[in-house]
Amino acid sequence: MNKLKVLISKEEIERKAAELAAELRTDYRDKNPLLIGALKGCFIFMSDLIRKLDIPLEVDFVRVSSYGAGIQTSGEIKLEYGTKTPIEGRHVLVIEDIVDSGLTVRFLLDYFGRQEPSSLKLCAMFDKPSRRELDVTIDYTGFTVPDVFVVGYGLDLDEKFRYLPDLCILEE
């Protein structure tokens, strides 16, 4: 039976989302950015962020996979669903729930970079640098988390636990 322990509370997450939105509002004012969410995990963070931004923007999504049904990345990134919005000449902000190995983020940044955006940056609510296999720059970061398996606030294990409002450590 899995046991859950709150690592970051929903109140802390809400405050951090507001702080990130304030920073993004300043950096992207008058730029009509294209926010691209990496599904499925980003959807809660991205919706919280957009509601707090209060600037003109556009939204699109990609769906990539690297985990399958386990808790370890397979190391193979697969683009399951790409964006429909043209990227060239746009200010693009990739929205991620968590960056751990860096494999998915590197894949996405390379993929969008080849489409010649005016700018390309990354915003992630959670960063797990202890798991990093590839060096990636996170331009806007919410929280750094330890090397534990976390669920909640959009993050899952086999499609379970996404609904949790807090970020929780999943203990065996």
Image (cartoon, rainbow, N blue to C red):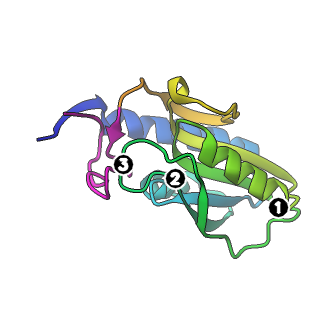
The CA distance from mark 1 to mark 2 is: 27 Å
Provide residue 172's location: percent of width, then percent of height.
19, 33
Task: Name the N-terminal-most of marks 3 and 1.
Answer: 3
Amino acid at circle 2? Ser
* Residue of label 2: 66
Q: Is disc 2 in contact with disc 3, using a CB cutoff of under 8 Å?
A: no
Looking at the figure, which quarter contains the N terminus? top left
Question: Looking at the image, which residue is at 50% across and 30% down?
Answer: 128
* Magenta segment main secondary structure: loop
Label 3 CA crowd tier, 10 Å (few <14, some 14–19, many 20+)? few
- Which mark lies nearer to you, 3 or 1? 3
**Residue extending furthest toward the bottom:** 84
- Residue 114, can we see it? yes
Q: Please indicate whether residue 168 sits to the left or right of residue 142 in the image.
A: left
Q: Is disc 1 in contact with disc 2, using a CB cutoff of under 8 Å?
A: no
* Residue of label 1: 90
Which numbered disc covers residue 70? 3
**Residue interval drawn in magenta:** 149-172
Provide residue 150's location: percent of width, then percent of height.
34, 37
Q: Is disc 3 in contact with disc 1, using a CB cutoff of under 8 Å?
A: no
Question: Looking at the image, which residue is at 71% across and 42% down?
Answer: 26
Q: Please indicate whether residue 71 sits to the left or right of residue 95 in the image.
A: left
Camera-nearest residue between 116 and 80: 80
- Which mark lies nearer to you, 1 or 2? 2
Label 2 CA crowd tier, 10 Å (few <14, some 14–19, many 20+)? some
Q: In this picture, is 116 found above or below 106?
A: below
